[in-house]
Image: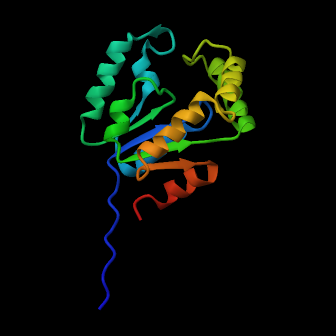
Amino acid sequence: MTTKKPKPTTPKRILIFGASGTGKNWFGERLSKKSRIKFYDTDDLAWIKRFTVRRDYKEKCDMLKKICKKDKWMIATGATTYVSCAEKRADLIIILEAGFLRKSYRIIKRHFQKNASGEEYSPSNPLKLVYANYLDYRKGGKGRIYFDGLMKKYPGKVRVFGQGEKRRFLEAWGR
């Protein structure tokens, strides 16, 4: 007699972490389309007028808590200070990683593309973001320490993806 393996449950609440340039939005938007789970970017919670008028800390926390109470959601964030409600409720936490040069290239490319198109975009110097990424994600940076803590706190629901893993995960979704 053969026993059927139970089919793994499909996550309904997905939290995507990563530094600037790791592909959080690219990945989240594609996964949202495949999964039919609404995608939220915490940048949209942090700003009243995108990248011009900052939202009050308490207000953005309240907005995130409201999203977290929903049955299904997908949240992309680079923030670590106000996302604990999402961490706790998530069925799956994905940490996106990319090499320093890849992230740097993407940050600078995005800056010039957004400026050329006239699209609202962060007024900060892209080189500051590149430098912050370098400092934060080298061994011992606060982002690395935070993610290591997440992996210990939620061992069954944290996965770390590089470039190849992102694509394979998208291809395999729903099989």
Residue, far bottom: 1
Is 42 placed left or right of 19 in the picture?
Answer: left
Q: Quadrant of the C terminus?
A: bottom left
Residue, far right: 101
Q: Is residue 72 above or below residue 136?
A: below
Kindly indicate the quadrant of the structure image that contains residue 164: bottom right
Q: Is residue 92 above or below residue 62?
A: below
Is 138 placed left or right of 7 in the picture?
Answer: right
Q: Position of residue 155 (x, y in %)?
A: 44, 50
Q: Quadrant of the N terminus?
A: bottom left
Is 174 placed left or right of 89 in the picture?
Answer: right
Kindly indicate the quadrant of the structure image that contains residue 165: bottom right
Kindly indicate the quadrant of the structure image that contains residue 65: top left
Count of residue discs? 0
Residue, far top: 53
Residue under the image location 29 percent in, 33 percent down: 68
Residues 122 and 78: in front is 78
Is 15 placed left or right of 112 in the picture?
Answer: left
Q: Position of residue 81 (x, y in %)?
A: 44, 23
Residue under the image location 48 percent in, 45 percent down: 151
Q: Is residue 37 above or below residue 165?
A: above
Q: Position of residue 20 (x, y in %)?
A: 60, 29
Residues 101 and 111: in front is 101
Q: Position of residue 75 (x, y in %)?
A: 41, 35
Residue under the image location 35 percent in, 35 percent down: 86
State the scheme by which the image is colored: rainbow
Q: Is residue 167 above or below residue 84?
A: below
